Image: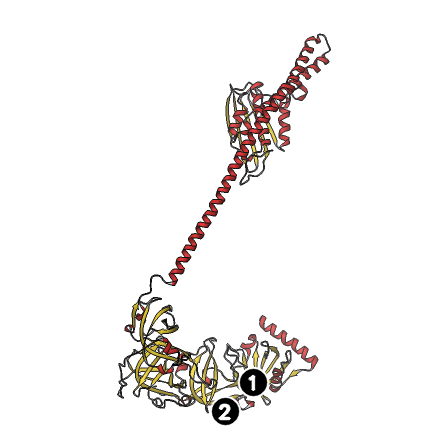
Amino acid sequence: MKADEAIALATLLVCRLVAAGTGDILQTAAEVNDAVERRAVGAHYDVTAKLVSLSDEKLPLFHAADETGMACFGMDPAIRPSIPTNAGDIVRIEGVVIPTSKDKVGLHSVRITLVSHGEPIKALQISGKDFYGRDNMRNRLVRIKGVVYDAMRDEIDYQWSFLVLNSDDTIIYAAISSERLKSDDLDRLIGSTVSVEGIVTDHYYGNRITLKRYLLMNGFSAVRVLSHSPADSFKVPEISKSYFPAPSNPFKDGRRRVCGTVVATWRHGRRALVKDGSGNLICTELNSATPPRIGERIEASGFQETDFYRTNLSRAVWRRATYNGTNPEDGEPPARMNARDVFTDNDGHEVKNMQLFGKTVTIRGIVRSISTFGSDTERIYVESDDFLLPVDASACPDALDDVSVGCTLDITGICIAETENWSATRMFPSIREIFIAVRTPQDVTLIARPPWWTPVRLVTLIGALLAVLLGIFAWNVALRRRAELRGKELADEQLAHVASELKVVERTRLAVELHDSLSQTLTGISMGIDSALDIAGDASEELKKQLNYTSKTVEACRTELRNCLWDLRSQALEESDMNAAIQLALSQIVSKTALNVRFAVPRVRLSDKTTHTILRIIRELATNAVRHGHASAIKIAGSIDGEKLRFSVIDNGTGFDPDHAAGVGEGHFGLEGIRERVDRLDGEVDISSSHGRGTKVTVAFDIPPAKIEGGHGNG
């Protein structure tokens, strides 16, 4: 069992349980129709009835009747393959009443079971007046005879087509649910007398929701042609000579023909004005892809309609003809006028002057707009006496080849008043518009081209000037901001230079004071300890050992003080390049030692505090290499890997054993001082050395991420 069928049966089971508890099971067509009228959503039905008709497979509904009447049932799509297909079969229909829209309900069938075969129900023959006049026609199978006045495919719902029938002077709309029907099949029915069979319904499943009662036919086979329209559409009576026919008479008369000369065409030839032998003007709607030419004699056959001014033809076909009647006078000179004559009366009131219809006129005006060529109509709009007059040039588009907005033109053509045709619901058909239909390219005469200085060009020039001024203003703002930024940079550089000089002066002052006080004091202490050692004589070894330790400690202090004094007076910290700073820091220590420095670390990445620490470590290592290792060459290298700075100092000195090197206990503070400085940076130090093989010391620690803008820190 398919999933859709299982869902349908489950729905049926639930409905049965609910209905069994309430006793509300509908069993006749009359009861289900009443439930639909009452909008009894949820009511379950179990009806045995005879199939009247099945709709097209795209439309999920069917009709069935019993002795109480006929009902229209919808169906679940899952059960369509299993339902009987023969009209007249007795079936059992089970389902539930469900909402189909905001204010409507319908019958949703979930199971249809064949009970027995039977004969189809015979359609009831009725007239057009019975179709609307009898209340018991709803959901009845009927047959109606009438003349097909019009036929069309629904332009918004592809699976529907419509016939417009005239039955006993009553208009009936018959809907055919068939997507395979062609427009040619429908066109051949126009004018034919037919008998159609279908269900009278007030419930429409398509988009024409305001079409209340109509005839629902099950496919094109429900149409039976009793008499075809004439094989020759032109073998019909000539149009009425009456200039003012009654509104409903042309409609009843059906197809008529006219013979005459085409004096104007518009809307790409889909409309034509024909002047017959009596001088009458007939507006003709042509149902043809090929329009006639201006001045051509034609026969046109169509359906009569009126706009209360004259008789018109709609859905007309045409052919060339040899006209044997009395020729209307041709070549009447055009009447020169302006647009005010078209849109006002003699007293100046705004009206539409129908007296000019069909007249040849010449109007001078200025072109104010031009429609896009290739659109539905090729038009220009001409201003004359403060009125805007449309000009249709679809009959000869070449007439507008040299026309542009602002040109002054003399336009000659036929004055056309396009009107609506009468219908029973419209008291007076309205005039849609009045325009001039141009016939030949010679009908448009260029009087003057537009002046160069046009409003459009003025607006364009003003816009361009405003754009230039805006650009100049923006450029000035940008230059001012750039100058401000540059001035700020120069000020910052000057402040930094002054601050640097102040720091040098202050460090020099401190160095002088320390040298004159603390350095002299330490020198005196060192000389006193040396004198004590000289006169110790036979003093105990412990005393001599303490004096030696104290002497070395004081000497280490003097060395550290000298380094501090050098730092204070050195310009190394002011260097912007680390290679130059290192060379300056080691200039007095390695004067006789080959020095190779490749320290690829930007100075801006290092604060003053970090730079000072690096220089002290490198100087201490270089001092040890020269003083203790007697090195003749020193290599210093540094780089940054991400946020890790790593540098090394390598010498070719005598080397030593790092595991047994003299330490603080023996009065040697160099290596211990280096480790303490590296520890303060949360770094690591690695010493690689051995006797006779030189020494390599590597230091690594993290530095802050690089900044987009910045300078030296003040750490």
From what the image shows, is residue 663 above or below residue 396?
A: above
Answer yes or no: is residue 296 visible. Answer: yes
Report which residue position mark 2 lands on. 129
Which residue is most to the front? 347
Question: Quarter-wise, where is residue 112 in the image?
Answer: bottom right
Instruction: Identify the residue at image location x=63%, y=27%.
Output: 675
Q: Nearer the viewer, residue 149 or 591?
A: 591
SS label for mark 2: helix
Residue appearing at x 59%, y 26% in the figure: 507
For label 1, the crowd category at 10 Å Cα-Cα, with few meaning under 14, some 14 to 19 and many 20 or more, is many
Identify the mark at residue 670; answer none if there is no mark.
none
Tag 2: residue type?
Lys
Quadrant including the C terminus:
top right
Horizontal side of residue 351 vs 135, given as left or right: left
Give the distance between the C-alpha atoms of the residues marked 1 and 2, in whole angstroms: 25 Å
Nearer-N-terminus badge (1/2):
1
What kind of residue is marked 1? Ala
In this rendering, position of residue 170 left or right of residue 573: left
Residue 525 vertical placement versus 494 (above, below): above
Viewer-closest of 262 and 583: 262
Residue 668 in percent (x, y) is at 64, 20
Q: Position of residue 439 (x, y in %)?
A: 30, 76
At horizontal 60% and vertical 86% (from top left) the residue drawn is: 29
Which residue is painted at 69% across and 80% down in the image?
20
Instruction: Answer yes or no: is residue 564 visible.
Output: no
Between marks 1 and 2 in the image, the one whose residue lies nearer the viewer:
2
Q: Which residue is mark 1?
A: 64
What is the x, y in percent for residue 532? Answer: 69, 11
Question: In the rendering, at what x and y percent does residue 183 appear?
Answer: 41, 79
Colouring style:
secondary structure
In terms of depth relative to the viewer, which is nearer, 351 or 13?
Answer: 351
